[in-house]
Amino acid sequence: DAGITQSPRHKVTETGTPVTLRCHQTENHRYMYWYRQDPGHGLRLIHYSYGVKDTDKGEVSDGYSVSRSKTEDFLLTLESATSSQTSVYFCAISGSGIGPFNGFYGYTFGSGTRLTVV
Amino acid sequence: AQTVTQSQPEMSVQEAETVTLSCTYDTSESDYYLFWYKQPPSRQMILVIRQEAYKQQNATENRFSVNFQKAAKSFSLKISDSQLGDAAMYFCAYGENTGNQFYFGTGTSLTVIP
Protein backbone atom coordinates (compact mmCIF):
# COMPACT_ATOMS: atom_id res chain seq x y z
CA ASP A 1 0.00 0.00 0.00
CA ALA A 2 1.42 3.35 -1.03
CA GLY A 3 0.54 4.93 2.35
CA ILE A 4 2.95 2.80 4.36
CA THR A 5 6.47 1.77 3.51
CA GLN A 6 9.03 -0.37 5.28
CA SER A 7 12.76 -0.38 4.85
CA PRO A 8 14.80 -2.34 4.17
CA ARG A 9 12.93 -5.08 2.35
CA HIS A 10 15.63 -7.62 3.05
CA LYS A 11 18.51 -7.66 5.49
CA VAL A 12 21.15 -10.12 6.57
CA THR A 13 23.01 -9.32 9.74
CA GLU A 14 25.38 -11.00 12.14
CA THR A 15 24.56 -12.19 15.63
CA GLY A 16 25.19 -9.52 18.21
CA THR A 17 24.85 -6.52 15.90
CA PRO A 18 22.18 -3.85 16.35
CA VAL A 19 19.53 -3.59 13.65
CA THR A 20 16.90 -0.93 13.02
CA LEU A 21 13.88 -1.38 10.82
CA ARG A 22 11.92 1.65 9.68
CA CYS A 23 8.23 2.11 9.04
CA HIS A 24 6.98 5.29 7.39
CA GLN A 25 3.36 6.28 6.82
CA THR A 26 1.83 9.15 4.92
CA GLU A 27 -1.69 8.63 6.28
CA ASN A 28 -1.34 10.56 9.56
CA HIS A 29 -2.73 7.59 11.50
CA ARG A 30 -2.35 7.47 15.24
CA TYR A 31 -1.82 3.74 15.74
CA MET A 32 1.21 1.92 14.38
CA TYR A 33 2.34 -1.66 15.01
CA TRP A 34 5.26 -3.99 14.59
CA TYR A 35 4.58 -7.71 14.09
CA ARG A 36 6.75 -10.66 13.37
CA GLN A 37 5.57 -13.55 11.23
CA ASP A 38 6.90 -17.06 11.78
CA PRO A 39 5.64 -20.39 10.43
CA GLY A 40 3.13 -21.97 12.78
CA HIS A 41 2.79 -18.79 14.84
CA GLY A 42 1.03 -16.43 12.50
CA LEU A 43 1.48 -12.76 13.30
CA ARG A 44 2.63 -11.84 16.77
CA LEU A 45 2.67 -8.32 18.11
CA ILE A 46 6.05 -6.96 19.19
CA HIS A 47 5.27 -3.34 20.08
CA TYR A 48 2.73 -0.76 19.12
CA SER A 49 2.36 3.00 19.33
CA TYR A 50 -0.72 5.08 20.01
CA GLY A 51 0.90 8.46 19.44
CA VAL A 52 4.18 10.32 19.31
CA LYS A 53 6.38 9.01 22.12
CA ASP A 54 3.53 6.71 23.28
CA THR A 55 4.38 3.05 22.92
CA ASP A 56 3.51 -0.23 24.59
CA LYS A 57 4.70 -3.81 24.56
CA GLY A 58 3.12 -6.70 22.71
CA GLU A 59 3.34 -10.40 23.43
CA VAL A 60 6.89 -10.91 22.06
CA SER A 61 8.67 -7.69 23.02
CA ASP A 62 11.80 -9.17 24.65
CA GLY A 63 14.92 -8.15 22.74
CA TYR A 64 13.16 -5.35 20.85
CA SER A 65 12.71 -1.64 21.42
CA VAL A 66 10.77 0.98 19.49
CA SER A 67 10.68 4.71 19.06
CA ARG A 68 8.22 7.14 17.58
CA SER A 69 9.47 10.70 17.48
CA LYS A 70 7.16 11.75 14.63
CA THR A 71 3.67 10.65 13.67
CA GLU A 72 4.88 9.25 10.38
CA ASP A 73 7.84 7.15 11.57
CA PHE A 74 7.95 4.09 13.81
CA LEU A 75 11.32 2.42 14.31
CA LEU A 76 11.97 -1.10 15.53
CA THR A 77 15.40 -1.84 16.98
CA LEU A 78 16.98 -5.15 17.77
CA GLU A 79 19.62 -4.11 20.26
CA SER A 80 21.74 -7.23 19.78
CA ALA A 81 20.36 -9.51 17.09
CA THR A 82 20.03 -13.23 17.77
CA SER A 83 19.24 -16.12 15.44
CA SER A 84 15.80 -16.47 17.08
CA GLN A 85 14.97 -13.05 15.66
CA THR A 86 15.27 -14.29 12.12
CA SER A 87 11.79 -13.60 10.83
CA VAL A 88 9.61 -11.53 8.56
CA TYR A 89 8.68 -8.24 10.18
CA PHE A 90 5.56 -6.31 9.30
CA CYS A 91 4.59 -2.80 10.14
CA ALA A 92 0.90 -1.94 10.18
CA ILE A 93 -1.26 1.09 10.72
CA SER A 94 -4.78 1.06 12.03
CA GLY A 95 -7.25 2.86 9.81
CA SER A 96 -8.68 4.77 12.74
CA GLY A 97 -7.04 8.02 11.70
CA ILE A 98 -6.03 10.36 14.50
CA GLY A 99 -8.90 9.32 16.78
CA PRO A 100 -9.24 6.42 19.19
CA PHE A 101 -8.82 2.85 18.01
CA ASN A 102 -11.69 1.73 15.81
CA GLY A 103 -11.89 -1.92 14.95
CA PHE A 104 -13.98 -1.31 11.82
CA TYR A 105 -11.02 -0.31 9.67
CA GLY A 106 -8.66 -3.19 10.18
CA TYR A 107 -4.99 -2.78 9.40
CA THR A 108 -3.05 -1.60 6.41
CA PHE A 109 0.25 -3.43 6.24
CA GLY A 110 3.64 -2.56 4.89
CA SER A 111 5.30 -4.96 2.49
CA GLY A 112 7.42 -6.59 5.19
CA THR A 113 11.11 -6.97 5.95
CA ARG A 114 12.79 -10.34 5.78
CA LEU A 115 15.52 -10.32 8.40
CA THR A 116 18.09 -13.09 8.60
CA VAL A 117 20.48 -13.23 11.56
CA VAL A 118 23.51 -15.40 10.89
CA ALA B 1 -5.84 -11.45 25.19
CA GLN B 2 -8.31 -12.71 22.69
CA THR B 3 -7.49 -15.93 20.90
CA VAL B 4 -8.11 -16.73 17.26
CA THR B 5 -7.81 -20.32 16.08
CA GLN B 6 -7.35 -21.59 12.57
CA SER B 7 -7.32 -25.36 12.83
CA GLN B 8 -6.40 -26.09 9.20
CA PRO B 9 -2.71 -25.35 8.57
CA GLU B 10 -3.07 -26.40 4.93
CA MET B 11 -5.93 -26.80 2.49
CA SER B 12 -6.16 -27.58 -1.19
CA VAL B 13 -8.87 -27.09 -3.78
CA GLN B 14 -9.32 -27.87 -7.44
CA GLU B 15 -9.54 -24.90 -9.73
CA ALA B 16 -13.17 -23.75 -10.16
CA GLU B 17 -14.29 -25.62 -7.04
CA THR B 18 -15.35 -24.20 -3.67
CA VAL B 19 -13.33 -24.31 -0.48
CA THR B 20 -14.09 -23.24 3.08
CA LEU B 21 -11.47 -22.09 5.56
CA SER B 22 -12.32 -22.27 9.26
CA CYS B 23 -11.74 -19.78 12.05
CA THR B 24 -12.94 -19.70 15.63
CA TYR B 25 -12.33 -17.04 18.24
CA ASP B 26 -12.76 -16.49 21.93
CA THR B 27 -14.34 -13.33 23.31
CA SER B 28 -16.74 -12.08 25.94
CA GLU B 29 -17.53 -8.95 23.93
CA SER B 30 -20.67 -8.49 21.86
CA ASP B 31 -19.37 -5.75 19.56
CA TYR B 32 -16.31 -6.60 17.49
CA TYR B 33 -14.98 -7.02 13.98
CA LEU B 34 -13.65 -9.99 12.11
CA PHE B 35 -11.43 -10.02 9.05
CA TRP B 36 -9.86 -12.34 6.56
CA TYR B 37 -6.50 -11.31 5.12
CA LYS B 38 -4.79 -12.92 2.16
CA GLN B 39 -1.01 -13.19 1.88
CA PRO B 40 0.15 -14.31 -1.58
CA PRO B 41 3.77 -15.29 -2.26
CA SER B 42 4.55 -11.59 -2.74
CA ARG B 43 4.20 -11.33 1.05
CA GLN B 44 1.79 -8.41 0.87
CA MET B 45 -1.12 -8.62 3.33
CA ILE B 46 -4.41 -7.92 1.56
CA LEU B 47 -7.78 -7.42 3.21
CA VAL B 48 -10.27 -9.86 1.71
CA ILE B 49 -13.43 -9.35 3.71
CA ARG B 50 -14.77 -7.74 6.89
CA GLN B 51 -17.66 -8.75 9.16
CA GLU B 52 -19.21 -6.54 11.83
CA ALA B 53 -20.48 -8.62 14.76
CA TYR B 54 -23.68 -6.62 15.20
CA LYS B 55 -24.69 -7.38 11.61
CA GLN B 56 -26.45 -10.70 11.23
CA GLN B 57 -26.04 -10.74 7.47
CA ASN B 58 -22.96 -12.55 6.24
CA ALA B 59 -20.50 -10.38 4.35
CA THR B 60 -19.75 -11.11 0.70
CA GLU B 61 -17.16 -9.75 -1.72
CA ASN B 62 -17.52 -11.24 -5.19
CA ARG B 63 -16.37 -14.88 -4.93
CA PHE B 64 -15.57 -14.54 -1.22
CA SER B 65 -18.20 -14.92 1.46
CA VAL B 66 -18.25 -15.67 5.15
CA ASN B 67 -20.37 -17.85 7.40
CA PHE B 68 -20.54 -15.90 10.66
CA GLN B 69 -21.98 -17.84 13.56
CA LYS B 70 -21.87 -15.44 16.51
CA ALA B 71 -23.11 -17.83 19.18
CA ALA B 72 -20.64 -20.48 18.11
CA LYS B 73 -17.87 -17.86 17.72
CA SER B 74 -17.13 -19.15 14.27
CA PHE B 75 -16.10 -17.19 11.18
CA SER B 76 -15.39 -19.28 8.10
CA LEU B 77 -14.37 -18.04 4.67
CA LYS B 78 -15.85 -19.58 1.54
CA ILE B 79 -14.08 -19.12 -1.76
CA SER B 80 -16.22 -20.01 -4.76
CA ASP B 81 -14.96 -20.78 -8.26
CA SER B 82 -11.40 -20.98 -6.98
CA GLN B 83 -8.74 -19.50 -9.20
CA LEU B 84 -4.99 -20.03 -9.35
CA GLY B 85 -4.52 -16.53 -8.00
CA ASP B 86 -6.33 -17.50 -4.80
CA ALA B 87 -3.35 -19.60 -3.74
CA ALA B 88 -2.03 -17.88 -0.64
CA MET B 89 -1.83 -17.91 3.12
CA TYR B 90 -5.09 -16.75 4.70
CA PHE B 91 -5.26 -15.18 8.14
CA CYS B 92 -8.32 -14.66 10.28
CA ALA B 93 -8.24 -11.59 12.55
CA TYR B 94 -10.32 -10.19 15.40
CA GLY B 95 -10.57 -6.66 16.80
CA GLU B 96 -12.85 -4.54 18.98
CA ASN B 97 -13.31 -0.81 19.53
CA THR B 98 -12.55 -1.09 23.23
CA GLY B 99 -9.16 -2.58 22.42
CA ASN B 100 -6.07 -1.28 20.69
CA GLN B 101 -4.97 -4.07 18.37
CA PHE B 102 -6.09 -6.97 16.24
CA TYR B 103 -5.49 -10.63 17.03
CA PHE B 104 -4.53 -13.10 14.34
CA GLY B 105 -4.84 -16.81 13.80
CA THR B 106 -1.86 -18.89 12.72
CA GLY B 107 -2.97 -18.99 9.11
CA THR B 108 -4.16 -21.52 6.53
CA SER B 109 -2.06 -22.16 3.45
CA LEU B 110 -4.33 -22.66 0.44
CA THR B 111 -3.13 -24.51 -2.64
CA VAL B 112 -5.17 -24.33 -5.85
CA ILE B 113 -4.72 -27.35 -8.10
CA PRO B 114 -5.05 -26.72 -11.85
Image (spheres, coloured by chain):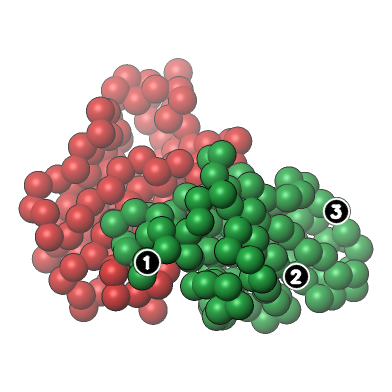
Chain colours: A green, B red
Tell me whether circle 2 and circle 1 mark residues in contact (CB < 8 Å).
no
Label 1 sits on what residue type? Gly
Q: CA distance from mark 2 to mark 1?
A: 27 Å
Q: On residue A12, which mark appears?
A: 3
Q: Is residue B49 left or right of residue B90?
A: left
Label 2 sits on what residue type? Thr
Q: Residues within 10 Å of mark 2 (few under 14, many from 20)?
A: some
The location of residue B61, given as percent across then percent down, is: 25, 34
Choose the circle earlier in sequence order: 3 or 2: 3
Q: On residue A10, which mark appears?
A: none
Q: CA distance from mark 3 to mark 2?
A: 14 Å
In the rendered image, residues at marks 3 and 1 fall on the same chain? yes
- The residue under the point 35% across, 74% down is B99
Q: Residues within 10 Å of mark 3 (few under 14, many from 20)?
A: few
Front disc: 3 or 2:
2
- The residue under the point 41% across, 58% down is A97
Choose the circle earlier in sequence order: 2 or 1: 2
- In this figure, which residue is indicated by the disc labeled 2? A77
Q: Is residue A34 above or below residue B56?
A: below
Q: CA distance from mark 3 to mark 1?
A: 37 Å
Task: Output the chain of dot 2.
Answer: A
The location of residue B92, given as percent across then percent down, is: 37, 54
Front disc: 2 or 1:
1
The location of residue B67, given as percent across then percent down, is: 18, 47
- In this figure, which residue is indicated by the disc labeled 1? A99
Where is residue A44, by image quadrant? Answer: bottom right
- Secondary structure of the residue carrying tag 3 is strand
Looking at the rendered image, the quarter that the C terminus of chain A falls into is bottom right
In the rendered image, residues at marks 3 and 2 fall on the same chain? yes
Pick the residue in front: A37 or A93: A93
Q: Is residue B53 left or right of residue A14?
A: left
